[in-house]
Amino acid sequence: MYLQSNLKILISNKLQFAKKTNIPRRTLEDIIYGNTPNPRIDTIMKIASELNISIDDLIYKDFTKENN
């Protein structure tokens, strides 16, 4: 699964993204840095929706290969 690495690539400004999605910045950072290994589905849905990608792509697609 690629959730953490994808979020590191896709979210350039954590504070701004947190405000847009109404997800606490700390929660967002905990997901990005692996402190929350199983985030709530509603949180993942908000993130995917704001990024305009599917939940499946967010979790299972390796975006690091897209940039190479």
Image (tube, rainbow, N blue to C red):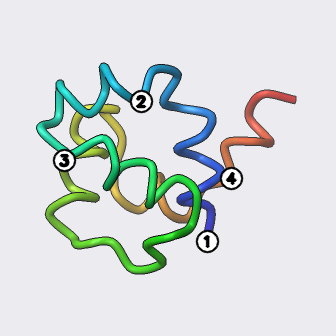
Report which residue position mark 1 lands on: 1
Q: Residue placed at 51% from the left, 70% from the top?
A: 35
The crowd level at tag 3 (other Cα within 10 Å; few <14, some 14-19, many 20+) is some
Could you give the CA–CA distance between mark 4 and mark 3, rounded to whole angstroms?
A: 20 Å
Q: Which of marks 4 and 1 is nearer the N terminus?
A: 1
Work out how far the residue at label 1 is from the one at label 3, CA to CA, in angstroms. Answer: 18 Å
Q: Decide which of tag 4 and tag 3 comes sooner along the chain.
A: 3
Sequence-wise first label, 2 or 4: 2
Instruction: Give percent across and percent down for residue 3.
Output: 53, 59
Which amino acid type corresponds to the residue marked 2 in the rendered image?
Lys
Helix, strand or loop at disc 1?
Answer: loop
Q: Which residue: 45% across, 49% down?
A: 29
Q: Mark 2 to mark 3: distance in Å?
A: 14 Å
Q: Which residue is drawn at 21% across and 55% down?
A: 45
Q: How far apart are marks 4 and 1 (CA)?
A: 8 Å
Q: Is residue 18 above or below residue 42?
A: above
Question: In the image shown, does 55 or 9 lie closer to the viewer?
Answer: 9
Q: Is mark 2 on a helix, strand or loop?
A: helix
Amino acid on which disc 1 is placed: Met
Q: In this view, does 17 lie above or below 6?
A: above
Sequence-wise, the earlier of marks 2 and 3 is: 2
Residue wearing tag 3: 46
Q: Do the residues labelled 1 and 3 touch (CB within 8 Å)?
A: no
- Residue occupying the far right of the picture: 68
Could you tell me how far apart the alpha carbons at marks 1 and 2 are, in whole angstroms? 21 Å
- Determine the residue located farthest toward the front in the rendered image: 26
Mark 1 vs 2: CB contact within 8 A: no
Circle number at residue 44 = none
Q: Position of residue 51 (x, y in %)?
A: 34, 32
Instruction: Name the residue carrying label 2.
Output: 14
